[in-house]
Amino acid sequence: MSSLYLTNIAPVDLADVVFEPKIEELINTFIAEYDASEVLAKYELPVSNKLFLYGASGCGKTMTAKALAKRLDKKIFIINLSSIVSSKLGETAKNLASLFNSVQHKKAVLFFDEFDSLGRIRDYDNQDSAEMKRIVNTILQLIDSFPADSILIGATNQIDLIDQALLRRFDMKIEFKNPSKEILDAYYDKLLAKYPKKYTEIKRIYSISFAEAKTVVLTGVKKNIIKAI
């Protein structure tokens, strides 16, 4: 079963994630609901526990999932979809059911990266259409019965590939885009702050993702250190 997910994940502090203001507001709303869950329960109000992150690659979706897990004091399971999806009839649905059953009582965060891999299942070139329907129905049923004290997070770079019935199961959807110049400058400052000032003179590049900006910083700082030597 452990081959279906990763659990030994380095934690991320929410304060270390740089958000655009609109995204930060939505994330704070999600957290606020969770923090107020006991009060909301008294009025039989549901607490959002299914979050969908979509948009450009390298813009912080995975970091956000890790940071939410730490902020909410939950263990995170990063799902290995390459192990879930199988070419064998019946295996994918079986793997999904086994996965959810194994973690549903652990009050954890389940993070499905590349969630479009599940959406594409229906497009496989397979004559057994009943099998494809069975897989989609399995996903929908598992999401519908997902425990309220756990959190489900899906992420994709290609939201257009995902079935609308699946997307409707998520309480909140957040789009991630390449950060603005102002947000990237804040990110550059945060990354460079841990190095001696004499090594932090780098050429900042904009209109790129956080992941690409981090590479710019690491490459530039290393170059400056080597040059100084």
Image (cartoon, helix red, strand yellow):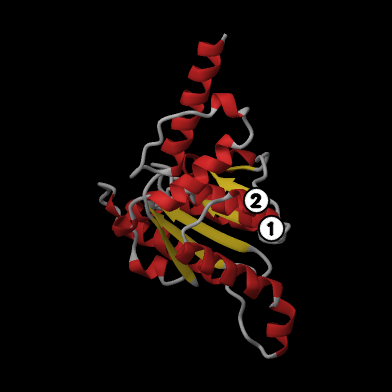
Q: Nearer the viewer, residue 88 or 75?
A: 75
Name of the residue lying farthest toward the top: 229
Return the x and y of residue 30 as percentages of the image width and height: 58, 69
Disc 2 crowd rating (10 Å Cα; few below 14, some 14-19, many 20+) is many
Q: Is residue 173 above or below residue 219?
A: below
| Mark toward the start of the polypeptide (1 vs 2) | 1
Would you name the residue on which mark 2 appears?
76
Would you name the residue on which mark 1 appears?
71
Quarter of the rendering occupied by the C terminus: top right
For image coordinates 64% across by 46% down, the residue present is: 12
Residue contact at pointers 1 and 2, CB within 8 angstroms? no
Return the x and y of residue 66 as percentages of the image width and height: 61, 50
Query: Residue 146 lies in what quarter of the image?
Result: bottom right
Amino acid type of the residue tagged 2 in the rendering: Ile
CA gap, disc 1 and disc 2: 11 Å
Query: What is the secondary structure assignment of the residue under circle 2?
Result: strand
